[in-house]
Image (cartoon, rainbow, N blue to C red):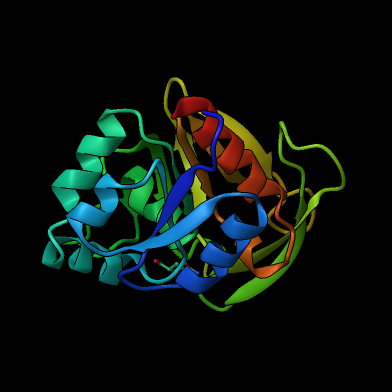
Amino acid sequence: MSGTPVIGVLALQGDVREHVAALTAAGAQSVPVRRPRELEAVDGLVIPGGESTTMSRLVDVFELREPIDKRIVGGMPVYGSCAGMIMLATEVLDGRPDQRGFDGISMTVRRNAFGRQVDSFEAPVTITGIAGDPFHAVFIRAPWVERVGEGVQVLGQVADGPSAGRIVAVRQGNLLATSFHPELTGDARLHRYFVDLVRATA
Ligand code: GLN
């Protein structure tokens, strides 16, 4: 693709504005997505942080489940951050029994994995394929990845501290997920990585 890619942010709940700003800073045109016809118009999609149980419910209310699953099967790049990572996992531990994600990355994630007492913390994380300093990763009631299936590439793990070694960034084909929130720290490298992926796919 030579032009500017159009990347939607699933805007049912969560930190939508921050992702729109980060994607714009990374060179994309970014639009909120709430309706199936808005989904049709995008080259890629970000699923933001928020609350995966609520998001799961709203995806059905807004009749977006089947359209998003279809676009994923069709190869549309999707990036999920935190609750978005949970929405992209094929298996969720400590979820609500009725919560459902998309048929996304072949992995098991644990919700609120870093401990319910540890609502939020920061740690350096190096991401494979992204040059420069480690990310200053912000975790907010974040999940971690407990198992990855075949074809899933681990891109990042917590470097040190009590959670050292925990998997917090993965990619499977055109699907990308992080436990942390790069949209909150003004570091556009991860969004740029995703914009490049969308550009290469469109
Ligand atoms: N704990 C939230 C959930 O289960 C995720 C938190 C976040 O996205 N910051 O969906």
Asked if residue 166 shows in the view, the reply is no
Residue under the image location 12 percent in, 58 percent down: 63
Residue 56 left/right relative to 117: left
Image spot of residue 45 (x, y percent):
40, 48
- Residue 10 pos. (x, y %): 36, 60
Q: Which residue lies furthest to the front in this view?
A: 3
Could you say where residue 93 lies in the image, as x and y percent from the top left?
A: 35, 53
Judge by depth and name the residue closer to the eye, 197 or 144. 197
Residue at the location (22% across, 60% down)?
A: 99
Q: Examine the rendered structure and indicate whether residue 66 appears above or below residue 18.
A: above
Q: Is residue 99 above or below residue 103?
A: below
Instruction: Tell me which image quadrant ligand 1 sits in.
Output: bottom left
Answer left or right for 96 relative to 153. Answer: left
Q: In this view, does 1 lie above or below 157?
A: above
User: Relative to the observer, which residue lies in front, 12 or 124?
Assistant: 12
Percent position (x, y) of residue 102?
26, 45
Residue for point 19% across, 54% down? 36
Q: Is residue 41 found left or right of 154 in the rendered image?
A: left
State the residue in front, 102 or 139.
102
Relative to residue 54, is residue 137 depicted above or below?
Answer: above
The answer to whether residue 58 is visible is yes
Quarter of the image with the C terminus in it: top left
Residue extending furthest toward the top: 150
Q: How many marks?
A: 0
